[in-house]
Image (spheres, helix red, strand yellow):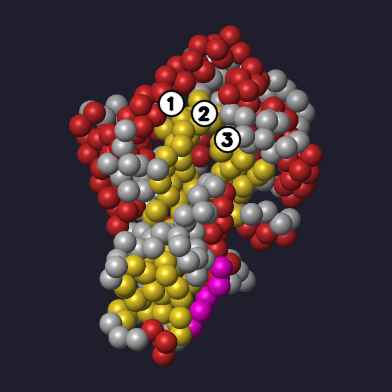
Amino acid sequence: MELRKFKASQLFNGYHLLDKNHVLVTNSDGVVRDIVKEEEAGDDIETFEGILTPGLINCHCHLELSHLKDVIPPHTGLIEFLCSVVTKRGFSPNVIQQRIIEAEKEMYANGIVAVGDIGNTADTATVKSNSKIYWQNFVEVLSFTDARADENIAHYKKVAAELESSLRTSYTVHRTSLVPHAPYSISPKTFELINANTANQIISFHNQEHPAEDELYKTGGGDYLKLFKIFGIEQSPFPVTGKSSICSVLPHFNNGQTIFLIHNTCMPEEDVQWANEYAASNNIKLVYCFCINANLYIENKVPPVEMLMKNNVQPTLGTDSYSSNWQLSIAKEIQSMQKHFPSLSLETILQWATINGAKALQWDDALGSFKKGKKPGVVLLANDLSNSKRLL
């Protein structure tokens, strides 16, 4: 089989940045053969300006919200943003499908090879069934009260079954699991049902994006009451625990799950330490996913990255959706992370975007690094981190 040989300003192998004297060798299908010194590579080397990297992993996206691009303005604050998402979803099915098609093409072209994708519906099924991207489908449950917990879980199981039915006969690599949306939208019984239905699966929930999330559990009050009124709920339906949201809801999980905690912009250090200790003692694994451009878009805030790193978390990166980002580009997430946290090495952030994401999504047997025998994708990242493109 014909070989392809790639050389660039730098080569990132999934773990380390190597200098321009290194050449990546693959077969024509993209299976990694080796990384060799240039003098050992022979002829026909394709040379590029930029950083060669394995395919990029987007651990948090909402593909089905792609029709909300440019609909919700930046810097509304989280509560107003959520209200807008709930009230501005009345688009025609044709528009929704076209935007999903465009967003999937964009992610594929810029080198994203796997996505942890949130959805309340099966609207993305058709596009995913023809996609070359790996999809971890997170069917997102909304269920405010215990009284409707069984009914709501049954509904979202049907959504999951519809997704699985559409993808089963395709060549798309995929998994599907039920996930809670957030502590401010899931009742205690619903959490317990999700725990029972997700043994040893990968799940996620939005965590501590706003101080009102903790206030809701500590006092029963706060700004989330405005969101609840859209659903006809006049007061908090959740128990007042006197604790933060993460300390109130994480104990519902003890069933071998890998749990992505998304955003974490208002997560204090004592909660990080508590959550990590709880996970270690209760048969679950935590993954911390940063979506820095979404945080900047919604509230012009950044997550407490340095504090989280000090506590030995395993970070990954996500784009969130077009409702809350200017683009669906992991390159731009890397660029923003380096801009706002210059103490972080580029090598570290690239690990988050590749091997960390692949390991967290349990696809590191195929993706995340240029290990011999893998087919992780070959991506060229601009030297200034402003863009990326798929080479293979």
In front of the other: 340 or 1? 1
**Nearer-N-terminus badge (3/2):** 2
Residue 308 position, x and y percent, is 68, 55
Distance, label 3 to label 1, CA atoms, is 14 Å
Q: Residue at x 76, y 32 (%)?
A: 243
Q: Residue at x 72, y 60 (%)?
A: 310
Specify the quadrant of the image occupied by residue 1: bottom left
Q: Nearer the viewer, mark 3 or mark 2?
A: 3
In front of the other: 24 or 381? 24
- Name the element at disc 1: helix
Residue 187 position, x and y percent, is 61, 20
Start and end of the magenta stretch? 15-19
**Position of 156 relative to 306 (above/below):** above
Amino acid type shown at disc 2 = Leu
- The residue identified by callout 2 is 178
In front of the other: 213 or 387? 387
- The residue identified by callout 1 is 160
Amino acid type shown at disc 3 = Gln
- The residue identified by callout 3 is 201
- Name the element at disc 3: loop
**Nearer-N-terminus badge (3/1):** 1
Amino acid type shown at disc 1 = Ala
Q: Residues within 10 Å of mark 1 (few under 14, many from 20)?
A: many
Specify the quadrant of the image occupied by residue 194: top right
Q: Main secondary structure of the magenta part?
A: loop
Badge 1 vs badge 2, beta-carbon distance below 8 Å = yes
**Nearer-N-terminus badge (1/2):** 1
Q: How many marks?
A: 3
